[in-house]
Image (cartoon, helix red, strand yellow):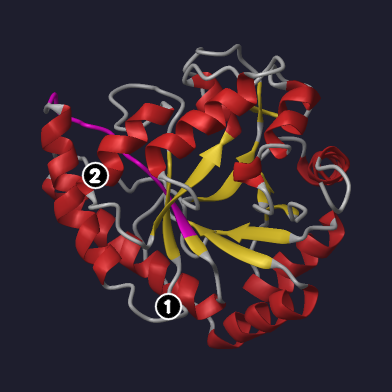
């Protein structure tokens, strides 16, 4: 099965009106949206008319939809207010994702702040996030897709092996999955270049999280070298991962059919070029 290729689309001015219009301009086959200010704690109710138009528009166009939760969420935070707001914000993203028919909500795995031990932070992740996962009992409920970081600071999850303790803390819940950001995993030290780099990385990831848990890919090249621990996205093929890295990533069984969402620079033209290139790199209809 081919990988649907799309991007994160703007929604200010209307989830369906603006978001789906941008998706058409890109030639997108999948879309990712914010349902709240990504750098704030507000939990807006949304517009039911736009929700329905978005849901119907995605169905008509065969688009898969995904939600990215706000960046401020950190279930490992030592600050009580941040922890409480993280739960409220994530619950809101999950509720809104269901309303618009999204398949999953991407959320960053967070970090152990305040000098607290990693084990203590993971225990708090369990306390805060596991109840949210247990609430996902409706057939239309989205998955929770955790996304690792580039390895900055005291991140709880940056390398493939870090997903193991995170999954264990959440009892490997059936609604738990992974969104793999290619720039992040590369920056954290997994070399996706060379004849075996992408394959070895994906083999390791699958061995840690289990088959079928990888649900989505954020396809971003990296402005920095492998292991730099810098989250700086580059356009596809012009960064240090390169076209061959993405081509090999897409030839691995673990990525078969998974949607690719770009979060690259360059505005409209850069995004359109990246979508077109990834469509070429994904190979023929049957592989």
From this view, report whether residue 269 is shown above or below residue 85: above
Residue 184 seen: no
Residue 86 drawn at (x, y percent): 27, 54
Image quadrant of residue 139? Answer: bottom left
The mark closer to the camera, 1 or 2, is 2
Residue 113 seen: yes
The main secondary structure of the magenta stretch is loop
Q: Magenta stretch containing residue 1, yes or no? A: no
Q: Which residues are magenta?
A: 105-115
Q: Which residue does the image show at 29% across and 52% down from the upper left? A: 172
Residue 149 drawn at (x, y percent): 43, 32
What residue sits right under mark 1 in the picture? Answer: 45
The reply to whether the C-beta atoms of the residues labelled 1 and 2 are less than 8 Å apart is no
Residue 176 drawn at (x, y percent): 37, 56
What residue sits right under mark 2 in the picture? Answer: 168
Q: Quadrant of the N terminus?
A: bottom right
Mark 1 secondary-structure assignment = loop
From this view, report whether residue 162 is shown above or below residue 4: above
From this view, report whether residue 53 is shown above or below residue 287: below
């Amino acid at each position: 099965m081919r990988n649907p290729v799309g991007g994160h689309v703007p929604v200010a001015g209307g989830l369906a009106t603006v978001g789906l219009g941008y998706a058409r301009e890109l030639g997108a086959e999948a879309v990712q949206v914010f349902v709240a200010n990504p750098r704030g704690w507000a939990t807006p109710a949304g517009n039911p008319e736009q929700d329905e138009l978005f849901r119907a528009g995605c169905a008509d166009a065969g688009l898969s939809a995904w939600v990215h939760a706000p960046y401020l969420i950190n279930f490992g935070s030592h600050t009580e207010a941040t922890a409480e707001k993280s739960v409220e914000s994530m619950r809101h993203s999950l509720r809104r994702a269901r309303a618009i028919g999204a398949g999953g909500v991407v959320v960053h795995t967070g970090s152990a702040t305040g000098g607290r031990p990693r084990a203590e932070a993971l225990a708090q992740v369990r306390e805060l996030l596991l109840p949210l996962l247990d609430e996902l009992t409706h057939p239309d409920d989205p998955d929770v897709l955790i996304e690792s970081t580039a390895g900055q600071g005291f991140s709880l999850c940056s390398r493939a092996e870090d997903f193991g303790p995170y999954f264990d803390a959440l009892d490997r819940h059936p609604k738990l999955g992974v969104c793999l950001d290619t720039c992040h995993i590369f920056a954290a030290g997994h070399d996706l270049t060379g004849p075996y780099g992408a394959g070895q990385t994906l083999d390791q990831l699958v061995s840690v999280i289990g088959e079928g848990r990888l649900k989505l890919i954020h396809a971003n090249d990296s402005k920095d070298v492998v292991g730099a621990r810098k989250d700086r996205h580059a356009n596809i093929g012009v960064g240090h991962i390169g076209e061959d890295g993405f081509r090999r990533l897409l030839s691995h069984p673990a990525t078969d059919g998974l949607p690719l969402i770009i979060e690259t620079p360059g505005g409209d033209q850069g995004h359109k070029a990246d979508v077109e290139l990834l469509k070429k790199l994904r190979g023929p209809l049957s592989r």
